[in-house]
Amino acid sequence: MTDQHADLCEKLGAFEPGILPHDVFHAVARLVVLPTFVVVPLLQRGDRVFVSLQKRDASDPHYASLLHPAGTVIRPTDTSLSATYARLMASELPEVKVRAGPVFVYTAHDAIARGREISLVHWVELADDGTPSDLFDVDALPSTIVETDYPRIAKAVSHFRAFDAG
């Protein structure tokens, strides 16, 4: 190991597992494949399906102000996938009432702006209590969605419809 690598390893060793400062996170994310947990919140009204999407912050370095389904990096401090899901729902969808799910759909392996990620894509069925104001008809999605999320939404909707029909 070179002195440069030893110095880097020593500095990285000073960090506690869990949340990293943004600059460190993005530097590491460029070098590794990050695992993520994605939830596509769906709502059935008659024969129409709607998806709830969140808007990224205007200061997001890669996807400023774009829409996306709820998702989070699986942290080394998450003790289970259930814990990751609970953390995700508490932070991104705290007011949402879930009727069913999460239901696993597929694993996506994508190149995204910060690097590569492997995502465990799920859907949840929302309770129709009028809470979500960020609903979009899945047959007329806006053009302001993160590009890699279109196939995730489409596959989740297809799985949801097949699940509901079965």
Image (tube, rainbow, N blue to C red):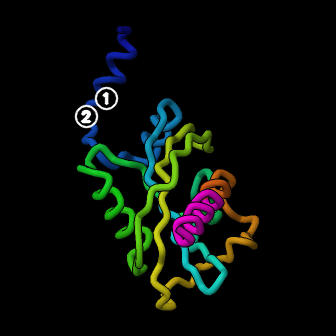
The stretch in magenta equals 153-166
Determine whether 52 is above or below 16 in the image: below
Identify the residue at horizontal 43%, vertical 40% (top origin): 24
Identify the residue at horizontal 33%, vertical 47% (top origin): 75
Residue 153 in the image: x percent, y percent?
61, 61
- Tell me: 21 left or right of 145: left
Q: Residue furthest front?
A: 166
Residue 38 in magenta stretch:
no
Image quadrant assignment for residue 16? top left
Which amino acid, by three-letter code, is at mark 1?
Answer: Lys
Residue 11 in the image: x percent, y percent?
31, 29
Q: Residue furthest bottom?
A: 130
Identify the residue at horizontal 45%, vertical 56% (top origin): 104
Callout 1: SS: helix
Residue 89 in the image: x percent, y percent?
38, 68
Which amino acid, by three-letter code, is at mark 2?
Answer: Ala
**Tag shown at residue 28:** none
Rate crowding at label 2 as few (under 14), some (14 to 19) or many (20 or more) other CA atoms within 10 Å. Answer: few
The answer to whether any part of residue 58 appears in the image is no
Residue 165 in magenta stretch:
yes
Which image quarter is the N terminus in?
Answer: top left
Marks 2,1: beta carbons within 8 A: yes
Q: Nearer the viewer, residue 82 or 16?
A: 82
The answer to whether any part of residue 106 appears in the image is yes
Identify the residue at horizontal 52%, vertical 41% (top origin): 117
Q: Nearer the viewer, residue 49 or 31?
A: 49
- Tell me: 108 left or right of 3: right
- As measured in the structure, the alpha-carbon distance from the residue carrying label 2 to the one carrying label 1 is 5 Å
Q: Determine which residue is flagged by label 2.
A: 14
The prevailing secondary structure element of the residues shown in magenta is helix
Callout 2: SS: loop
